[in-house]
Image: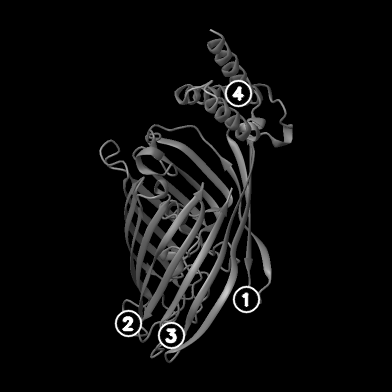
Amino acid sequence: MKKIGFILFMATTLLIGMGSYGISEALDTAGQDRLIDVLIKKGILTEEEAVDIKKEAEALGKQNQEEIVKKIKDKGLAVPKALKGLEVGMLAYLDYSNGQKPGPDDGVSSFNEFRLTRGYLTVKKEILPWMHTRITIDTHQDDTGDYKERIKYLYAELRPSDLGLLTDMKSEIGLGHIPWLDFEEHVNPYRCQGTMAVERAGTFNSADKGVSLRGDFGGKLEDAKEKTGNHHYDGRYGSWHLGVYDGSGYHASEKNNNKVIEGRLTLRPLPDVIPGLQLSYLGLYGEGNEEALDGDYPDYEVNLGMLSYEHPWVILTAQYRQTQGNAAGKWVDAEGDALDTEGYSFFGNFRLPVFDRKLSLFARYDYFDQDKDDAIGKDADYNMFLGGLALDVYKHNLLLLAYETTDYGDDAGKKGEVPIVDNNLGDDHRIQAVWQIEF
């Protein structure tokens, strides 16, 4: 009876001590575990009794923390008014790369460098339930090596009520997301390695000044994270995004009076059977931002389709696109007419059955023809291959190792540039290590 009473006394003491202090619980856990180990060694507790005590303590601690959080939300305790509805986040890419860059006439130049390729600081604020705002500062290194700050996002976000099948709508007014890249970058999680296929080719970047409206079809996909591995863009039947923008992109000034119309339509055709399957289309129509030799602004059009499949263990995408010109207005021939281009890209990511599936193997292939109609050169394409390993250390804090190489056609320009006849770029390649910091 004395042993049983002592066990009950110690169990009660441990439950109270381990479950009542919130933050201090994490600090005391090691000491409490050592105490339990001593009690087991002295025969006061059995292994089974110790396991039960730990489980009950964890449950009690979680319950107490949930009650504290509820009190804070209900009564505003310990949260200054200015901080209510405020979110602060950071995303940075710390990069080491070693390899060679291409030059004309099969020339190359080597590089071996540490880089801070991006640093984003984001502040979001709920002003009213239907009115939010966001600002993101983008720190980047310019051509002189100096680090500069510029605004990537700064917009008011309005949240209208649902309208039938159109749900979870958000309108961005200001410098906001354009419809495509934020969507694709939440399917392909390795933006830290480099830009997506359409941006790397030089067609457009991820933000612009304008007005847009986006939302879901038919509410949210239930348990989207468990079913697809992704809780972003989790509309039950898909999502959509429409906008009118300057067209110049977020780090260029507007040089014409034209506005660009952009829209993305994503359908999830079988949410109950194959929830991770989505079919997406991007349409874009406007004029390039640079005046051509004839005094007109070149055409700027994009038609892009992508088939994607997401599962907690695997991601697969296949993309095809045709474009005329680009956002900058620099993809033109000698007469100032926009160049027709064509490209496709394939991506795969496989979570390996080790380290609790936190280690992934990924690969990607991009093909892009800078001059589909041979207006400047007949061999103006490139083939890019990349692959590597990524370790999700903790909540999207990644360590990534990759190898990338590109084979250029005889008349191809560098990525983002126009073709040059008999340019004969040398092959480029790099070995890359990236640490992604996110909170």
Mark 2, other Cα within 10 Å: few <14 / some 14–19 / many ≥20: some
Q: What is the total number of numbered labels drawn onto the structure image?
A: 4
Q: What colouring method underlies this structural image?
A: one colour
Q: Amino acid at mark 1?
A: Asp
Sequence-wise first label, 2 or 1: 1
Let me know if residue 8 appears in the view: yes
Mark 3, other Cα within 10 Å: few <14 / some 14–19 / many ≥20: few
Q: Secondary structure at mark 3?
A: loop
Of circles 4 and 1, the one toward us is 4
Sequence-wise first label, 1 or 3: 1
Q: Secondary structure at mark 1?
A: loop
The residue labelled by disc 1 is: 143
Quarter occupied by residue 126: top right
Sequence-wise first label, 4 or 1: 4
Which label is found at residue 374? 2
Mark 4, other Cα within 10 Å: few <14 / some 14–19 / many ≥20: many
Residue 231 point in image, percent of width and height: 43, 41
Sequence-wise first label, 2 or 3: 3
Of circles 2 and 3, the one toward us is 2
The residue labelled by disc 3 is: 334
Q: Is 62 situated above or below 4?
A: below
Q: CA distance from mark 3 to mark 4?
A: 74 Å
Q: Are marks 4 and 2 in contact (CB under 8 Å)?
A: no
Q: Are marks 2 and 1 in contact (CB under 8 Å)?
A: no
Write the residue at 38% across / 76% down: 370
Quarter occupied by residue 18: top right
Write the residue at 45% across / 44% down: 232
- Left or right: 105 in relation to 313: right
Q: Amino acid at mark 3?
A: Ala
The residue labelled by disc 4 is: 19
